[in-house]
Image: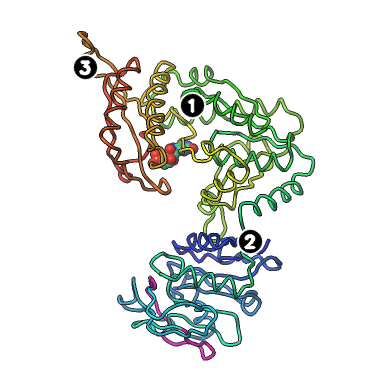
């Protein structure tokens, strides 16, 4: 499968370059700047990213570019462009503040293949502290802005370009066209699609796994479900999935999800471990302790079930690309290992198979759709691993779980029937550890309060509280108080993240 390699020099926008290339239906991989995979025949071109460093810094990331230059088309972006110039004898110096932010291309060489179709005056986004002041002699300027002479250059006699602006950010109006031109220069066929991904991945899995057996923990979420589907397509019933009811799932979720998986043809073992979890959680109030108990409980149940199966060699995991990038430092060392089911691989001594490890979340959804999964499985809100356990403040009891499940179900079904479900990133109800006075009929009540939480977000790193219609909130509040025994007060959480978090524990 043809690919573009993006060498990461540490810029915050490196991931965005990856996104843009994928949006142009071309497969790419982001690798630490010093980990170029020499000898990989599928490489069609190389992009050098930006960096928080100046090329003049003592500890700047520098690398020998000889395995790359003149062997592949190369595009240096910002620091990448400065590094190319610097390492060929050019001069890079501190720029002034005029070189930050929006700028316009004041002149450009329209016949240059990287700038094909780009118009004079087109807006670009600069964000460098340094600027190239002296270009090596075979570097030819192909675009300028008012304040930056070498906004873009090409090295003569070589398919190597440098741009000191960022084509990957939206503020660079024709950035996608520049990247597309680069892919054209690289001779990319641009045929990366969910269907082609499925085809190549299934083949690769068959080669990797041979006749081995795989075990996988399902959570009902999109990542583990798509992972299961891909593995199933590759090795059929040599894949065994385990879905554990820890007693902290949404109302009827266990039965519903098992039925969904059955439709998909997966071999799933459903384990009802509710009582075991409730028992282990008895009397525990401290949030971190609760999390640890739930995590450990899961590992123990999974391990016991796995031992009943014969000769399993692999553990399937729904790790996705942002997890991988997050876990790799720029030098390629692992900062934190990312497991959806922390601790399992070590305990069970299984090899890991992670077919989604190079996909972004929306690509996972597209693959799921292509695999024929039902929309409600693919477009489901995120739900935390410890489930309702982090939404019951204080001690967890089966009765509190019942109250929360009923209230949560009314809220979520309400969002669906009012057409609001897809407008929010995630939603849920929190059972507060307080009672308050109320009146029902002629009777004084002293019962629980619940908080509704709904947020908008793009990545859960930051979030805003969803501005849901008052009519809707009013209807949900009435319905919960009327129907859920044990609740007499509903409040709406209007905190954003930061400084709050999405979950309450
Ligand atoms: P916070 O509360 O940190 O949540 O703003 C951010 C996102 O992560 C989810 N979340 C978890 N997911 N295990 C998970 O699998 C956890 O322990 C956990 N804690 C929070 C949360 O639902 C939100 O989507």
> Residue 15 location, x and y as percent?
49, 59
> Residue 116 location, x and y as percent?
51, 79
Front disc: 2 or 3 = 2
The residues tagged by marks 1 and 2 sit, at their Cα atoms, a distance apart of 40 Å
Disc 1 + disc 2, Cβ < 8 Å: no
In this rendered view, identify the residue nearer to me: 107 or 337: 107
Question: Which residue sits furthest bottom?
Answer: 137
Residue position marked by numbered label 2 in the rendering: 191
Residue position marked by numbered label 1 in the rendering: 249
Q: In terms of sequence position, does the residue under pointer 2 or pointer 3 come before the other? A: 2
> Residue 99 location, x and y as percent?
34, 76
> Residue 84 location, x and y as percent?
52, 79
The residues tagged by marks 1 and 3 sit, at their Cα atoms, a distance apart of 29 Å
151 left or right of 315? left
Looking at the rendering, which quadrant does residue 107 occupy? bottom left
At 63% from the left edge and 46% from the top edge, which residue is drawn? 354
137 left or right of 469? right
Where is ligand 1, by quadrant? top left
Judge whether residue 399 is colored magenta: no
Residue position marked by numbered label 3 in the rendering: 437
The secondary element bearing badge 2 is classed as loop
Looking at the rendering, which quadrant does residue 132 occupy? bottom left
Which segment is the magenta one?
124-142
State the predominant SS element of the stretch in magenta: strand
The secondary element bearing badge 1 is classed as loop
């Amino acid at each position: 499968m043809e690919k573009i390699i993006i060498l990461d020099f540490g810029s915050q926008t490196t991931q965005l370059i990856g996104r843009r290339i994928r949006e142009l239906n071309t497969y790419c991989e982001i690798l630490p700047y010093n980990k170029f995979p020499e000898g990989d025949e599928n490489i069609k071109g190389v992009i050098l990213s930006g960096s928080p460093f100046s090329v003049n810094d003592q500890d700047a990331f520098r690398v020998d570019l000889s395995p790359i230059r003149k062997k592949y088309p190369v595009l240096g972006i910002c620091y990448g462009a400065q590094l190319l110039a610097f390492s060929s004898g050019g001069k890079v110096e501190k720029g002034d503040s005029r070189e930050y932010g929006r700028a316009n291309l004041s002149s450009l060489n329209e016949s240059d293949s990287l700038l094909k179709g780009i118009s004079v005056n087109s807006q670009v986004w600069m964000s460098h502290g340094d600027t190239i002041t002296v270009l090596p002699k075979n570097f030819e300027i192909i675009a300028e802005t008012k304040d930056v002479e070498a906004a873009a250059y090409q090295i003569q006699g070589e398919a190597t370009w440098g741009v000191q602006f960022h084509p990957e950010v939206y503020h660079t109006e024709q950035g996608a066209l520049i990247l597309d031109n680069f892919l054209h220069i690289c001779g990319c066929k641009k045929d990366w699609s969910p269907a082609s991904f499925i085809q190549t991945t299934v083949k690769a899995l068959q080669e990797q796994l041979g006749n081995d057996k795989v075990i996988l923990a399902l959570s009902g979420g999109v990542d583990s479900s798509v992972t299961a589907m891909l593995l199933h397509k590759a090795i059929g019933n040599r894949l065994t999935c385990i879905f554990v009811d820890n007693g902290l799932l949404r109302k009827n979720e266990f039965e519903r999800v098992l039925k969904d998986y059955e439709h998909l043809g997966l071999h799933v073992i459903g384990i009802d471990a509710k009582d075991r979890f409730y028992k282990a959680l008895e009397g525990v109030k401290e949030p971190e302790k609760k999390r640890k108990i739930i995590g450990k409980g899961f590992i123990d149940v999974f391990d016991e079930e796995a031992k009943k199966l014969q000769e399993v060699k692999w553990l399937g995991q729904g790790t996705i690309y942002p997890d991988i990038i997050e876990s790799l430092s720029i030098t390629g060392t692992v900062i934190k290992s990312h497991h959806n089911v922390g601790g399992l691989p070590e305990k069970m001594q299984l090899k890991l198979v992670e077919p989604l490890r190079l996909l972004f979340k929306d690509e996972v959804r597209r693959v799921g759709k292509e695999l024929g999964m039902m929309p409600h499985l693919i477009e489901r809100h995120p739900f935390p691993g410890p489930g309702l356990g982090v939404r019951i403040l204080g001690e967890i009891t089966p009765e509190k779980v019942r109250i929360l499940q009923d209230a949560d179900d009314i809220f979520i079904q309400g969002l669906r029937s009012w057409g609001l479900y897809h407008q929010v990133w995630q939603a849920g109800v929190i059972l507060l550890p307080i009672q308050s006075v109320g009146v029902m009929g002629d009777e004084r009540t002293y019962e629980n309060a619940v908080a509704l939480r709904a947020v908008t977000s793009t990545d859960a790193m930051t979030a805003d509280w969803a501005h849901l219609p008052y009519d809707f909130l009013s209807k949900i509040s009435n319905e919960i108080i009327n129907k859920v025994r044990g609740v007499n007060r509903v409040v709406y959480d209007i905190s954003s993240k930061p400084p709050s978090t999405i979950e309450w524990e």
